[in-house]
Image (tube, rainbow, N blue to C red):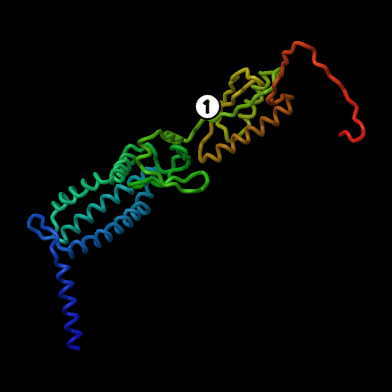
Amino acid sequence: MDQLIFTLSSVWAIFLKFWQFRLYEVDGNPITLGTLVIGIFLLFVGYLWARRLSQQITDKVLTRFEIDDSIRASLSQVIFYVLLIVFTLFILHLLNIPVTVFTVLGGALAIGVGFGSQNIVNNFISGLVLMVERPIRVGDVIDVGALQGTVEEIGTRSTKVKSFDNTHVVVPNSSFLEQNVLNWTLSDNVVRYKVCVGVAYGSPARVVEECLLDVAESNENILRHPKPTVIFADFGDNALAFELYYYARLRTMIELKKIASEVRFSIDERFADKGVVIAFPQRDVHMDIVHPVQVQVLKSGPGTP
């Protein structure tokens, strides 16, 4: 029993030696290994509390006001950062760690940036810019690079975009500031779309125009203002080219494509009723020869296909 107590005392003494090991001093205050471990643990707990509390404030307080979803998401992020800073300062005060410790950490961070964390800092700053300037917002339909989808969440380092294939893509925030981004719903969700059709030469152009306008005006998903417009685009190689422009409200890209599909079905039916022929590619072959072409008709004999 005495041997066990002695062993436990020795282990405890070794543990205390490491726990009280001084890493460095800041303004005369020693920073020990134990203080660092407790600080990291409390910062982790503070991070979880800040995340949960900011979410509860968003769900129970901000939802009572008529605030746009994108603004609500930005405010939620700001509340989270504020709470995280408050918890961090409280933990530093609780552990008697001076704020000047961040001068040391700032120097370490500067060294880290020089060794490859530029992308992390770049994406973090880009996230703050996105939240302040709001070129994209939660719920916006965007095109960035080859990706097309709906913004679901703007985070500190990356933005979550839900594609129209029902997959989620995590995009670094810096991508939205370093390349062109098409935001279909930045100012409103009214967009203009175009359906092209070609009719055979000899078709009555005015009748084609009337058919296209009737199709657009009879579709309940197409807005009446601004009015649909028909453009006689060109005398093509094989057809008279027409373009139907109309406006519709964009909720998802698949709905916009479904409207265009309905318009094409209606155009095909309306042209069939009016006797308008939709053109197809044709080629006239002209042979420039010196002598007449001899044509010979042979009778098929036994065994000849």
Q: Is residue 272 above or below residue 100?
A: above
Q: Residues within 10 Å of mark 1 (few under 14, many from 20)?
A: few
| Percent x, y of residue 28 | 7, 57
Quarter in which the N terminus is drawn: bottom left
Quarter in which the C terminus is drawn: top right
Q: Is residue 250 above or below residue 77?
A: above
Secondary structure, mark 1, is loop
Residue bearing mark 1: 226
| Percent x, y of residue 148 | 48, 40
Residue at the far bottom in the pictured view: 1
Residue at the far right in the pictured view: 302
| Percent x, y of residue 52 | 33, 57
**In the visual, does 14 lie left or right of 65?**
left
**In the visual, does 63 lie left or right of 249?**
left
Residue at horizontal 69 percent and vertical 31 percent from the top:
268
Q: Is residue 161 above or below residue 33?
A: above
**In the visual, does 259 lie left or right of 203?**
left
Residue at horizontal 29 percent and vertical 59 percent from the top:
49
The residue lying toward the viewer, choosing from 210 and 112, is: 112
